[in-house]
Image (tube, grey):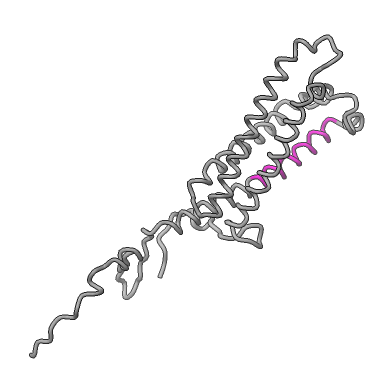
């Protein structure tokens, strides 16, 4: 017996992180992202309740940046709420085995992976932008002086190495969510083609629903006719 599938079937696996099912891994991943975005939303809301925490008070540019800060806070709040909704949908979809609910979270993962890839490419093509970015950081930023004193080549290599590890980890998480989507989709799909090959012949087996609803199974046997 063999299942007919696409060439991508060889890359399909039901295990995640070498210890749990892809469905369980997707639920854990959705809950983790849900907690992170909930914490970010709480920080943003706490900053909105105390405007002195994020406004540039006491500077000449405070009036110029006041509207931009309010707009950024509103955008960040909307993005956090959207991410909470997407993560909740993915968690619910994996738990209740609704494949369509996982698609928005999978699209977010692809978008996040693409952004990190563009960052890595920009660092590789324009390495001088790293120094410019570090110079714009606040003076009290942790380890700013130590990072600035490093050799430019070593700094670029370390950044690219960290980004490569991050991209590899994100790609693995994308594959886990994709395998969970395929597992749920195939589980809910009753039209899987199953063939039995015997003596160079192939027989198409009907689906379970069609077999269960077949009225011929309850029909009486044919009458006996003497030869």
> Toward the viewer: 39 or 210?
39
> Toward the viewer: 200 or 168?
168
Write down the region rendered in magenta. 152-170
Q: Quadrant of residue 132?
A: top right
Q: Position of residue 91 (x, y in %)?
A: 59, 49
Residue 77, placed above or below residue 97: above
| Residue at the outermost left position | 227
> Toward the viewer: 74 or 6?
74
Query: In this figure, what is the number of numbered marks?
Result: 0
Q: Position of residue 172 (x, y in %)?
A: 63, 49
Q: Which residue is drawn at the image coordinates 81% and 17% (left, top)?
A: 56
Q: Quadrant of residue 25?
A: bottom right
Q: Position of residue 44 (x, y in %)?
A: 73, 30
| Residue at the outermost front position | 49
* Residue 86 included in the magenta stretch of the image: no
Q: Position of residue 69 (x, y in %)?
A: 73, 19
Q: Which residue is drawn at the image coordinates 79% and 25% (left, top)?
A: 50
| Residue at the outermost bottom position | 226
**Relative side of 90 to 131, left or right:** left
Q: Where is the N terminus found, in terms of image quarters?
A: bottom left
Residue 204, placed above or below residue 134: below
* Residue 168 included in the magenta stretch of the image: yes
**Relative side of 219 to 92, left or right:** left
Residue 215, placed above or below residue 133: below
Q: Where is the C terminus found, in terms of image quarters?
A: bottom left
Residue 15, placed above or below residue 98: below
Q: Which residue is drawn at the image coordinates 67% and 42% (left, top)?
A: 167
Q: Which SS type dominates the magenta stretch?
A: helix
Q: Which residue is drawn at the image coordinates 87% and 31% (left, top)?
A: 151
């Amino acid at each position: 017996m063999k299942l007919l599938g696409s060439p991508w079937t060889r890359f399909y696996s039901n295990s995640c992180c070498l210890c749990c099912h892809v469905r369980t891994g997707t639920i854990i991943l959705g809950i983790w992202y849900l907690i992170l975005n909930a914490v970010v939303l709480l920080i943003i809301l706490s900053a909105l309740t105390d405007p002195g925490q994020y406004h540039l008070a006491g500077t000449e540019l405070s009036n110029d940046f006041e509207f931009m800060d309010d707009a950024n806070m509103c955008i960040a709040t909307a993005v956090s709420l959207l991410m909470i909704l997407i993560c909740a949908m993915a968690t619910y979809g994996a738990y209740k085995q609704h494949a369509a609910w996982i698609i928005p979270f999978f699209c977010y993962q692809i978008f996040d992976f693409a952004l990190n890839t563009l960052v890595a490419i920009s660092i590789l093509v324009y390495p001088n932008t790293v120094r410019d970015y570090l110079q714009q950081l606040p003076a009290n930023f942790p380890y700013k002086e130590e990072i600035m004193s490093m050799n430019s080549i070593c700094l670029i290599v370390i950044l690219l190495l960290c980004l490569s590890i991050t991209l590899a980890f994100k790609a693995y998480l994308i594959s886990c969510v994709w395998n969970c989507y395929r597992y749920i989709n195939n589980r809910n799909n009753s039209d899987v083609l199953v063939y039995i090959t015997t003596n160079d012949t192939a027989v198409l087996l009907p689906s379970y629903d069609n077999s269960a609803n077949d009225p011929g199974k309850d029909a009486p046997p044919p009458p006996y006719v003497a030869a």
